[in-house]
Amino acid sequence: MNRPAALLLVSSLALAQTPSSDAAFGVWPWLVGNIDASVPSIIAQAQAAGTDTIYLHLFRTTGPGQGTLHMVDEAGNWNAANGPIDPDARLTTFLSQAHAANLQVVGVVNCFLETGPLPGHVAHETLLLNVIDYLVNNFGAGGNPVYALDGIALDRVRFYTGTGNPHAPVTDFVRRVKQKLGLVPLHAFLMANLYTFDGPTYNGVFNSYASAMGTLQSQFGQHWENLSEWLDVYSPMAYIADGGVYGTNSNLMRAYVQVVCQYARQAMTNAGRPGKRLLPAVRAWNDATGTTTATTLDASVAGSLLGNADGFMAFRYFTMTGQTTWWNALAARSTAFAEWPVASLSLGTTQGLTRNLSAAGSTSLVAPSGSLTYRFDIDDDGMADTPWGSSSALPWLSPSPGSHRVAVEVRDPSGRTAVRKRRITTGASGLSVSAGSLSITAGGTRTFSITGGPGAAGLVYVLGATASGTSPGLPLASSVLLPLNYDPLTEACLLLANSPILPGFIGLLDGNGGGQGSLVLPAGGLSPALAWTTWHFAAALADPISGEWRATTAAAPLLLLP
């Protein structure tokens, strides 16, 4: 870039005056102890400042394979091997009060230490993934999330010192975290040291994009472009204060934060993902390295918005307590109230293999409910399976009996989003047989009825059978397991499907997800040696256009009698 701060300040000054609708602050309980009594005042302060999101630090690494959970184990299933508990917060209470005010809450997980572990430490990364799974994929008996967090933020996801550090371990760990989260947004605090962007003479003649990115990769292992594939929110730590290298020069402070944000946006653009959220963390504490003032905060936020950031995240709440001028500086750059939606996902009636989902309980303080749009991830793989649409309801087809995770993403007309997961457990078989036994000697007809429900309407069905049991079954696709062991009987069903012996064994389900097939056994049509054996029948359901397997029924037994 190599241009002085003065040139940066003449561009887009009007943008710096536009209040942000994406403001946040962080709460770090382990620095102050139990915060339960402070929750109402934290929520009230968030509302007064016009912030939309609260970052809440929940887990802190203390050594290789070690860490502390800084919250109450309300789920009752915390694995003690993951570390001790310091009950600094009752998370469900915090979440319920925040969501009632339409504030989103992002859980912060501290990852690595300067003294170790470092990125690439397999055992420690496994521990961190277990912690994140506990926070995000923990569900109560009814399927609701125990902790309905609106995102996860990774803190200290980096190397600390030296040069020539590889960036692949950091990116790979972030990738695995995102795969654990699915649609739930992943945030990360990124290094943005002054000396990386300015210096060695701190005069606003900033280092080039290539130089800054190279230093960040070499020292910290953070490759901003590669990370954009997995991160939903960038939070560069652009910390400035009076008494630092810029003295009290707020113009240089603003220019530094602006360049940090411009480079972050360039990294996203270079990676083909220019629309990722950019929420730099700005300094809001005092220590020997500098003094925060309303002026330094205003410079930080103005620089963020000049640099095309979506907003800002003030770091952190308890060091800001009582600092009225600080809060006023933030409020002046924020919209008057929380504008981001809060998502909800509830279960309705069961119809065959279909469970009716509803996101109608999702809320927004600025967007009428009729203006919200929705899309669903029916298998929690992080890829939406439905396009954006105005319907908050979805007839969800269970891939197979058992427990499954689903998610909904809610969007308002301005593009602000929220995500909610839940678990669905279904025992519906989806297949019944007209009678549970059949005589080999007498022969007869047995009809198999498929009841898929509305979510299965129009799908192709294929009935099959096995003489060798239902376990381990036949995997057809991710989370789609046909409970039949493939054997000669299975192959015979495929060859004879829709013949006079097996009429209707392949077909299309009707508008209610219903279909029928039959076994027509002639008298004496099977060897008497098969008497007292059990055949199992099941149906597999597929998309008629893509051919993708969508679901299977449970297995229905048929006992062969003499």
Image (cartoon, grey):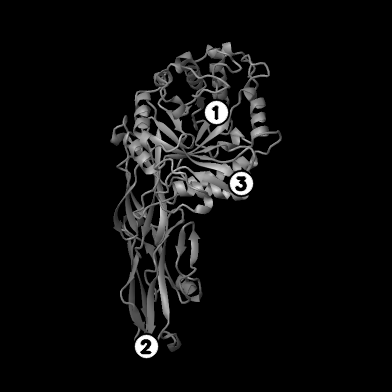
In the figure, residue 157 lies in which quadrant? top right
In the picture, the disc for residue 441 is: 2
Mark 2 or 3: the one toward you = 3
- How many labels were placed on the picture? 3
Residue 5 vs residue 383, the one in the foreground: 5
Location of residue 158 in the rendering, given as x and y in whole percent from the top left corner: 61, 37
Which residue in the structure is indicated by mark 1? 237
- Give the secondary structure at mark 2: loop
Residue shown at the point (53%, 53%) measured from the top left? 81
- Give the secondary structure at mark 1: strand
Any part of residue 382 in sight: no
In the picture, the disc for residue 348 is: none
Q: Amino acid at mark 3?
A: Pro
N-terminal label among 2 and 3 = 3
The answer to whether 499 is drawn above or below residue 261 in the figure is below
Location of residue 465 in the rendering, given as x and y in whole percent from the top left corner: 43, 72
Which residue in the structure is indicated by mark 3? 64
- Which of the image's four quarters has the N terminus? top right
Any part of residue 105 in sight: yes
Residue shown at the point (59%, 34%) measured from the top left? 225
